């Protein structure tokens, strides 16, 4: 079941996911995320930071990688980061050649 | 960089990036998930065996449609059955006795080179191997087998996707070129090349710097020792040599027979539909079958029927001929038909002893078939030990 939490401050969109980020869940999250992002950008377009918390995510699908890339491209370079990444999931980003680009810890 | 090179780079970057992402996602799968994917993919390939065989036969103009159906079935159903109980993901063995645990780790991206002789079966076989081991695979097929190869890859890919495989786990080159294949072979993100094809291609794979498993040319001798069961050996050789018009690289290219049984073997071959060429006919056949410049078999005869070959070279043979046999006196460039032919043409040698038989077979293998296959047929086991 999809569980995600979005918290926003003036300049930060924090997204915590608590489920298997397979194709279906990632698709649903992407829709929610897109709406949030549009809303925030309309309010204050400059200097936004996005943080994905993957503490409770142990699987990601291609669709979730694409969501991460969308998020990274939506903000200035260095303003997107992924935190609390499970080692197995971190390895997936590394194998996909995205570890450095997505600022993963 | 000129336009052509930019296009090659763009195509390659896209394929590699997709395949890399798929391999990364695939590394998370467990054995049950993988086995379910392979099962569904193999079933889909087997279900499409007839359509794919028809496509391959029509597109390449080589081989026998019915035999390609069997090849497709072998490459899917048999491979699935043979590998279904093998563990390939994460923890694959845990020995209480030794305390050793073995883990399987995917390689990443595999490059699959497809031969024109067995396009659809090779694509499905390599795809299943890649899926079973959680790797992604990119196929590069020859232009004259492109459509059927892509269709085979799509068939497996779509079934795998439905069963939960990662997007892009099977990719293919839409517009193949030598430069693109070379660029893929040498790409640092390609972890392994599965190369099936001619000598040049397999050599290129081995010298690319990327680990490679190559299936190159063979020049397979079959030695019929005097104790052999003649009826059975002749039957087996004809069956093997006529399968898909002799395009399997492990099929016999030359028959070496002990003098004591030579007459009987010749008669048996004739009674089973073999046509022995006379010296004039040999000259005509070798002029067409072997390219003198490249010193290798000509695509004109590969996978063609004896009837078509006879028409091509201008000789008359009986309507029901299954195999053309060329009695030869030696092995080497001066005897072009002692090479690999991948068609229903066999070289034929008569030898005086076991030692001479082994020597002729060794010479044949050293003439373009080293490291591939040799066959020795006998009934008395001491002969096997001596060899």
Image: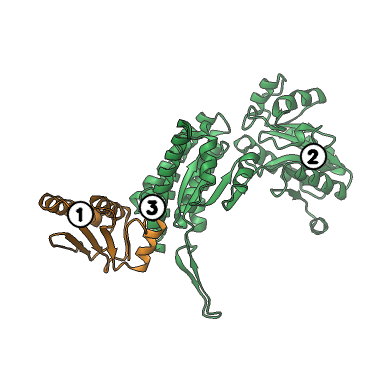
Indicate the secondary structure of the residue bearing disc 3: helix
Respond whether the residues carrying marks 3 and 2 are from the same subunit: yes
Q: Nearer the viewer, residue B53 or A70?
A: A70
Residue plotted at (54% across, 38% down): B68
Q: Is residue B329 above or below residue B108?
A: above
Distance from label 3 to label 1 (Cα)? Answer: 20 Å
Residue B153 lies in what quarter of the image? top left
Q: Please give the residue where the numbered disc 3 appears in the rendered image.
A: B21
**What is the quadrant of the C terminus of chain B in the image?**
bottom right
Q: Is residue A80 left or right of residue A89?
A: left
Circle 3 packing at 10 Å, graded few (<14), some (14-19), many (20+), is many
Viewer-proximal residue among B290 and B27: B27
Identify the colour of chain A in the image.
Answer: orange
Chain bearing mark 2: B
Residue B149 image point, x, y percent: 48, 38
- Taking B164 as reference, is B332 left or right? right
Q: Is residue B29 visible?
A: no
Q: Is residue A79 left or right of residue B249?
A: left
Which chain letter matches label 1? Answer: A
Instruction: Using the rendered view, name the quadrant where residue A5 is placed.
Output: bottom left
Chain B's colour is green
Q: Mark 2 sits on what residue?
A: B265
Residue at x-position 20% and y-position 54%: A28
- Residue B78 drawn at (x, y percent): 51, 51
Q: Mark 1 sits on what residue? A: A28
Q: Position of residue B349 (x, y in %)?
A: 82, 38
Gap in Å between the C-alphas at discs 2 and 1? Answer: 72 Å
Q: Nearer the viewer, residue B77 or B111?
A: B111
The answer to whether residue B29 is left or right of residue B299 is left
Q: Which tag is nearer the camera, tag 3 or tag 2?
A: 3
Q: Nearer the viewer, mark 2 or mark 1?
A: 1
> Which color scheme is applied?
by chain
């Amino acid at each position: 079941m999809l569980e995600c939490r979005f918290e926003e401050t003036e300049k930060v969109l924090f997204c915590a996911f608590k489920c298997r980020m397979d194709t279906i869940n990632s698709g649903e999250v992407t829709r929610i995320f897109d709406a949030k992002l549009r809303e925030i950008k309309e309010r204050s377009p400059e200097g936004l930071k996005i943080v994905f918390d993957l503490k409770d995510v142990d699987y990601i699908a291609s669709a979730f990688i694409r969501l991460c890339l969308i998020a990274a491209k939506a903000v200035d370079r260095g303003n997107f980061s992924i935190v609390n990444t499970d080692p197995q999931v971190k390895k997936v980003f590394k194998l996909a050649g995205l570890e450095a680009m997505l600022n993963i810890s | 960089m000129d336009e052509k090179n930019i296009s090659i780079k763009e195509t390659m970057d896209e394929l590699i990036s997709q395949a890399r992402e798929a391999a990364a996602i695939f590394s998370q799968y467990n054995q049950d998930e993988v086995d379910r994917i392979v099962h569904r993919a193999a079933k889909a390939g087997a279900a499409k065996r007839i359509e794919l065989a028809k496509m391959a036969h029509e597109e390449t103009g080589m081989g026998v449609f019915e035999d390609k159906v069997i090849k497709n079935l072998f490459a899917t159903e048999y491979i699935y059955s043979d590998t279904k109980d093998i563990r390939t993901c994460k923890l694959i063995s845990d020995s209480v006795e030794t305390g050793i645990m073995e883990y399987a780790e995917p390689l990443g991206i595999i490059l699959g080179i497809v031969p024109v002789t067995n396009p659809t079966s090779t694509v499905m076989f390599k795809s299943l191997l890649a899926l079973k081991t959680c790797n992604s695979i990119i196929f590069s097929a020859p232009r004259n087998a492109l459509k059927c190869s892509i269709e085979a890859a799509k068939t497996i890919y779509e079934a795998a996707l439905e069963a939960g495989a990662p997007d892009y786990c099977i990719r293919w080159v839409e517009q193949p070129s030598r430069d693109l294949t070379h660029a893929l072979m040498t790409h640092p993100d390609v972890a392994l090349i599965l190369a099936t094809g001619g000598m040049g291609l397999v050599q290129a794979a081995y010298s690319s710097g990327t680990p490679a498993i190559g299936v190159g040319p063979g020049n397979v001798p079959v030695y019929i020792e005097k104790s052999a069961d003649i009826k059975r050996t002749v039957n087996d050789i004809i069956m093997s040599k006529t399968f898909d018009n002799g395009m399997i690289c492990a099929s016999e290219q030359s028959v070496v027979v002990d003098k004591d049984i030579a007459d009987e073997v010749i008669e048996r071959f004739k009674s089973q539909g073999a046509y022995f060429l006379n010296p004039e006919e040999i000259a005509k056949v070798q002029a067409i079958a072997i390219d003198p410049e490249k010193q290798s078999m000509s695509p004109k005869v590969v996978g063609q029927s004896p009837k078509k070959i006879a028409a091509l070279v201008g000789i008359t043979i009986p309507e029901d001929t299954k195999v053309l046999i060329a009695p030869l006196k030696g092995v080497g460039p001066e005897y072009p038909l002692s090479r690999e032919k991948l068609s229903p043409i066999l070289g034929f040698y008569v030898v005086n002893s076991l030692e001479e038989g082994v020597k002729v077979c060794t010479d044949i293998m050293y003439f373009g078939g080293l490291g591939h296959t040799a066959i020795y047929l006998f009934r008395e086991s001491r002969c096997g030990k001596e060899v």
